[in-house]
Image (spheres, helix red, strand yellow):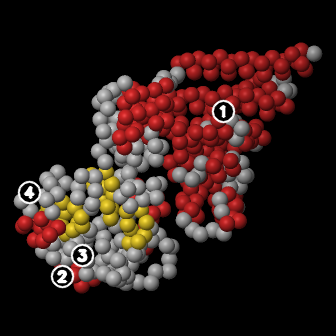
């Protein structure tokens, strides 16, 4: 129980996927313009992360590890993630067409999103158990949601201000993102000191 | 040999095949019917996504026209009769001309009639100014003059003339985007058939209005008394038309002491 709490806190706050590990910057910059598409995208990413963990973890422990085929993990995980994202896109198109239209091109981008592959690979690296991996994936998704929601609020403020022509658009947004990432560094050391 | 070569290859191949089968099944089971007609109709619509038709965007309206027989083809205000005719042809249904509408700005507060009560140094936007001590106009239902409506108009129909918004009737299609943008809610949509409107939105009592703006409606009710069709009433300290009853006789226009009722030529 305590380990799960530590995992959740660290992956949501201290080692936030977007703001500390700099994974998943593409949807972070691309979809965070409007709040509801940002939230929808985060839920899609969380769902894919959890499903991917649920499928890839058994594949790794039962198929790859016993036969010393750990080097295959990247390509096998990508295969699984790609299939899952396609499945998510097909279901969204059928059941939640509004979200499908508002996410548009960013949905297939979850496939090549390093955040999802990162979540899955980190489960292996940190040597979590199955349950811990699921919670890690869920926490990664929640951290992603947190970063997206925070940043979409900031972006809506930036839009209305006069920005010098050279910085208009992506440069100003990247600068804002780096400042937000800096602020998240303030969470460093929380885990060790709370769970002393 | 087996462990080194066959196994890895077969693992990747099997996972690929399983994924392929699962996706094929999913795409058949969860297939979405796409009606070609929806796309054709969508192409005919102006693509402004203003919502004047009552649906959330042009694609939504196109879908509803095709799916639901009861939805009329003449609801698109920016498209007008042209678009209604084309859509009716494409779908083979009867053509009904669209009701022409256009926007009006209900404020006469030019600098010679009223004044601003602050020198505003903040963000030059009506919405931002409205947040700051209810706006810079002496009357708090005034046109603030920063042109949020001008920015949002896609038809170049509204401009700032004499520090207040002015609508070019020939260009306005009545899409309603300026109506939603105005933070003081002084822009309204009226049908092309209406010839008169009250160019004031001030909810202050007549005496106060007169002090802050010499062009404002003083709620004297002369228009209400002279109207034989019960089409104009003074409510909340300014006069407003009941568009269903107004027959454009012009009696209110003649009798208004402050000349705040305006005439729109054809």
- Using the image, tell me which numbered label, if any, was put on residue A52: 1
In the image, taking residue A64 as reference, residue B72 lies left or right, namely left
Q: Which of marks 3 and 1 is in front?
A: 3
Q: Mark 3 or 2 closer to N-term?
A: 2
Q: Which of marks 3 and 4 is in front?
A: 4
- Using the image, tell me which numbered label, if any, was put on residue B207: 2
> Which residue is at the front of the view, B209 or A51?
B209
User: Split into 4 quadrants, where in the image is the N terminus of chain A?
Assistant: top right
Q: Nearer the viewer, mark 3 or mark 2?
A: 3
Q: Which chain carries label 2?
A: B
Give neighbour class at mark 4: few <14, some 14-19, many 20+ (Cα, 10 Å): few
- Using the image, tell me which numbered label, if any, was put on residue B229: 4
CA distance for labels 3 and 4: 24 Å
Are callouts 3 and 1 both on one chain? no
Query: Where on the picture, by quarter, is residue B2?
Result: top right
Residue placed at 42% from the left, 59% from the top? Answer: B157
> Which residue is at the front of the view, A129 or A154?
A154
CA distance for labels 3 and 1: 66 Å
CA distance for labels 4 and 2: 28 Å
């Amino acid at each position: 129980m305590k380990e799960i709490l530590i995992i959740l806190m660290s992956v949501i706050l201290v080692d936030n996927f977007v703001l500390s590990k700099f994974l998943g910057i593409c949807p972070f910059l691309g979809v965070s313009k409007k709040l509801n598409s940002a939230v929808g995208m985060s839920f899609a990413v969380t769902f894919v992360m959890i499903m991917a963990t649920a499928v890839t973890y058994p594949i790794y422990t039962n198929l790859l590890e016993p036969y010393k085929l750990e080097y295959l993990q990247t390509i096998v995980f990508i295969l699984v993630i790609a299939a899952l994202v396609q499945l998510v896109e097909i279901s969204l198109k059928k059941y939640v067409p509004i979200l499908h239209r508002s996410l548009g091109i960013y949905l297939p981008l979850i496939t090549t999103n390093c955040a999802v592959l990162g979540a899955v690979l980190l489960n292996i690296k940190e040597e979590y158990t199955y349950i811990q991996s699921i919670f890690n994936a869920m926490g990664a998704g929640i951290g992603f949601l947190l970063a997206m929601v925070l940043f979409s609020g900031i972006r809506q403020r930036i839009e209305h201000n006069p920005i010098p022509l050279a910085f208009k658009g992506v440069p100003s947004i990247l600068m804002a993102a780096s400042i937000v990432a800096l602020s998240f560094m303030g969470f460093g050391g929380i885990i060790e000191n709370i769970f002393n | 040999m087996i462990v080194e070569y066959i196994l890895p290859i077969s693992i990747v191949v099997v996972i690929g095949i399983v994924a392929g089968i699962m996706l094929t099944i999913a795409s058949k089971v969860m297939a979405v019917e796409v009606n070609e007609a929806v796309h054709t109709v969508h192409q005919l619509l102006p693509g402004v996504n203003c919502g004047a038709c009552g649906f959330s965007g042009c694609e939504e309206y196109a879908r509803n026209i095709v799916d639901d027989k009861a939805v009329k083809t003449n609801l698109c205000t920016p498209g007008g009769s042209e678009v209604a005719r084309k859509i009716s042809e494409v779908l083979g249904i009867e053509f009904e001309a669209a009701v022409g509408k256009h926007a009006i700005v209900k404020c006469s507060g030019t600098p010679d009639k009223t004044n601003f009560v602050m020198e505003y140094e903040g963000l030059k936007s009506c919405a931002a100014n409205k947040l700051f001590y209810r706006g810079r106009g002496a009357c708090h239902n005034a046109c603030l003059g920063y042109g949020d409506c001008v920015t949002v108009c896609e038809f170049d129909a509204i401009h700032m003339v004499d520090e207040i918004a002015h609508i070019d009737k020939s260009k306005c299609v009545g899409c309603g985007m300026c109506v939603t943008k105005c933070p003081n809610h002084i822009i309204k949509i009226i049908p092309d058939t209406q010839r008169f409107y009250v160019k004031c939105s001030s909810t202050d009592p007549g005496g106060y209005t007169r002090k802050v703006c010499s062009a404002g409606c003083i709620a004297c009710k002369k228009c209400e008394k002279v109207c034989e069709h019960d089409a104009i009433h003074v409510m909340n300290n300014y006069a407003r038309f009941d568009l269903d009853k107004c027959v454009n006789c012009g009696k209110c226009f003649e009798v208004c002491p402050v000349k705040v009722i305006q005439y729109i030529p054809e």
